[in-house]
């Protein structure tokens, strides 16, 4: 079993509900346990600005799924939530990205771990630091230290009830 961190985001069709449904779908993955989920944060869109703000969070899971198998499972969850990939940075019902998979570094077509630019994005680093401040971003450092390099004022916590799975 490996610990992985999944970044969740949504800005369409009741985003808070989409994220809660995303957490539940992660908990139902085979050979996987949802260990923790961060509070929800609100952030402005990146890349394509003419869209609603995003609601973001991070989940910690323990999984026996290999990275590619986990990615395939996440893409299936996105499709089940009506995700359509119209253009880069487009609005979305549910986005699930593997931010970290243990301390592995993977660069394959369609799969990059750690997630590129995660260390620059407050909407990933703030919720990740909430549930895993000592996690290591390979080649970058400890999450709590990387958090100092992002503008934490660019996100606003909207759910202060962090949940840890039993």
Image: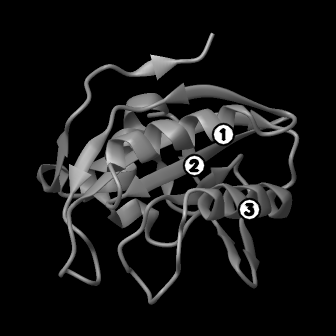
What secondary structure is marked by label 1?
Answer: helix
Dot 2 alpha-carbon crowd within 10 angstroms: few under 14, some 14 to 19, many 20 or more: many
Q: Is residue 31 left or right of residue 86?
A: right
Dot 1 alpha-carbon crowd within 10 angstroms: few under 14, some 14 to 19, many 20 or more: many
* Quadrant of the rendered image containing residue 113: bottom right
* Quadrant of the rendered image containing residue 74: bottom right
Decide which of tag 3 and tag 2 comes sooner along the chain. 2
- The image's mark for residue 6 is 2
Q: Is residue 112 above or below residue 142?
A: below
- The residue that disc 1 covers is 26
Quarter placement of the N terminus: top right
Mark nearest the camera among 1 and 2 is 1
Q: Is residue 78 left or right of residue 86?
A: right
- The x and y percentages for residue 63 are 80, 38
- The image's mark for residue 144 is none
- The residue that disc 3 covers is 71
Q: Residue furthest bottom?
A: 87
Q: Is residue 110 above or below residue 155?
A: below
Would you say the residues marked 3 and 2 are in contact, meaning their CB atoms lie under 8 Å apart? Answer: no
Task: Report, in whole angstroms, how far the alpha carbon at label 3 lies from the one at label 1.
Answer: 12 Å
Q: Image point 80% across, 58% down: which residue?
A: 67
Would you say the residues marked 1 and 2 are in contact, meaning their CB atoms lie under 8 Å apart? Answer: yes
């Amino acid at each position: 079993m490996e610990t992985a961190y999944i970044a969740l985001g949504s800005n369409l069709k009741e985003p808070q509900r989409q994220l809660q449904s995303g957490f539940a779908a992660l908990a139902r993955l085979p050979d996987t346990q949802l260990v923790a989920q961060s509070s929800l944060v609100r952030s402005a869109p990146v890349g394509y600005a003419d869209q609603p703000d995003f609601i973001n969070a991070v989940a910690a899971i323990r999984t026996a799924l290999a990275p590619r198998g986990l990615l395939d499972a996440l893409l299936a969850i996105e499709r089940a939530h009506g995700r359509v990939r119209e253009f880069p940075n487009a609005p979305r019902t549910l986005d699930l990205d593997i931010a970290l998979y243990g301390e592995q570094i993977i660069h394959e077509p369609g799969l990059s771990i750690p997630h590129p630019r995660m260390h620059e994005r407050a909407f990933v680093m703030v919720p990740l630091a909430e549930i895993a401040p000592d996690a290591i971003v390979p080649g970058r450092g400890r999450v709590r230290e990387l958090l100092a390099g992002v503008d934490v004022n660019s996100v606003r916590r909207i759910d202060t009830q962090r949940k840890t799975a039993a």
